[in-house]
Image: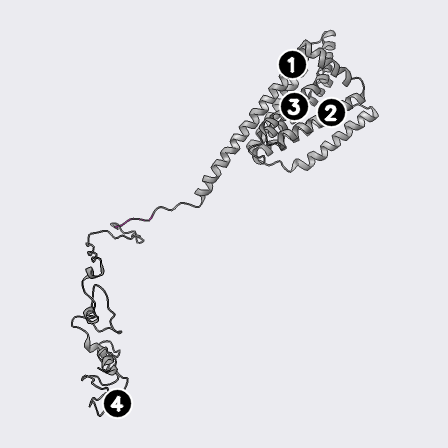
Amino acid sequence: MTNDRRHTELGWAPEGPRSDAASGSPTGQPGSPAGYHGAPAPDPQTGYPVPAYAAHAQPGYPAQPYPAQPQYPHNPAGYDPAQYGQSHDPAAYGHAAPPPPPHSAPSPYPVYNLAGLAGSSGPQPPPTTTPREPAIQKAAPASARRVRFIKLTYLHLFLAILAFAGALRELMTQPFLVAKISVPLTTFALGGRWNWGVVLVAFMAVSWVADRWASGATSKLTQYLGLAFYVLAEALIFVPLLAIVEWKTQAILARGGAEPHIVRDAAFVTLGIFTMLTLSVVISRKDFSFLRGGLAVASGAALSLIAMSLVFGFSLGLVFSVAMVLLAAGYMLYQTSQVLEHYHPGQHVAAALALFSSVALMFWYIIRIFLRARD
């Protein structure tokens, strides 16, 4: 069989008529069957040309625009695998043909009922999560750590205040501590303005070291040592002031006056102001970090006035004490907002020390105000 004959059986036909004396076919194609006359005639129903290979289509199948491709296991185009040495039996390839799925079996693919029709079968897509859920899940542990940090900070502040009050009571009432520590310290501090300047410089140095231990050290033991060191330094520097309060109280009682309760009333006022300022920050949720620069300038001005009073020998009166109470209140606002928003969750010891320093500063100058008011 020639190539021209094979192409004709597969449906190839020339585009135009030509004569071939050898074949006697009107198309000029050797061995062309009757009915192939060059260009295909149009279909009376569709109006499109019908290709020549449409005459070979099997009964029951419509004419296709392209030669049918072999399909397995169905063979709608009449393709015979045995012609090319192939077998119809799937077992010849080492596997059995899968049985056709029953019509009642559910589809293995999810059915999306976009039109809202009832009775759809098949697995439905899993519910989607909103974009905020992962953020909430991540933020929940951070919020819990912040709450735990705040609780630990104010617990340590409360313990520091109790330790401060206990240390002052022992220093003012324990005979051994009074004889060995309180009396010598008070005598030296009140011996002259330069002596008091030395006490202040020593206190500032101790405060700096304690703050470095509490905030910069990685060891918990060092942080607690820094807080304890600062509480003890505050108790010691309060001893000369409480000695003056005791002398003032004795003078008032000697004149027939009532007990002034200077220390007790100053403590109540200090705790009341601290509580109100703390609640104002917590309720308003306002960040007072902007006070940092102003507080630094005000602290520098206060230290300059104290140094000038030591050098020139003038007394800092009631106005200065009131201004220092306001400065301590500003520090309370700033440090409370830092505790609520900015401190690292592992710095509860340093945060407690900062708050305690503000409470002690306010307590000191409120005592001075009461000393002047109850003269």
Three-letter residue code for mark 2? Ala
Between 219 and 264, the residue placed more toward the observer is 219
Question: Which of the 4 quarters of the picture holds residue 223?
Answer: top right
Residue sitting at the far right? 312
**In this figure, which colouring scheme has been used for the structure?**
one colour
What whole-number distance in Å separates the C-alpha atoms at marks 2 and 4? Answer: 123 Å
Q: Start and end of the magenta stretch? A: 121-125
The quadrant holding residue 226 is top right
Is residue 157 highlighted in magenta? Answer: no
Q: Which residue is mark 1?
A: 169
Residue at (54%, 30%) from the top-left corner?
A: 149
Residue sitting at x 19%, y 76%: 56
Q: Which residue is mark 3?
A: 229
- Quadrant of res 23: bottom left
* Mark 4 burial class by Cα count in 10 Å: few <14, some 14-19, many 20+: some
**Which residue is drawn at the image coordinates 20% and 55% (left, top)?**
101
Find numbered disc 3 in the image and state the secondary structure of the residue it sits on. helix
Q: Indicate the secondary structure of the residue bearing disc 4.
A: loop
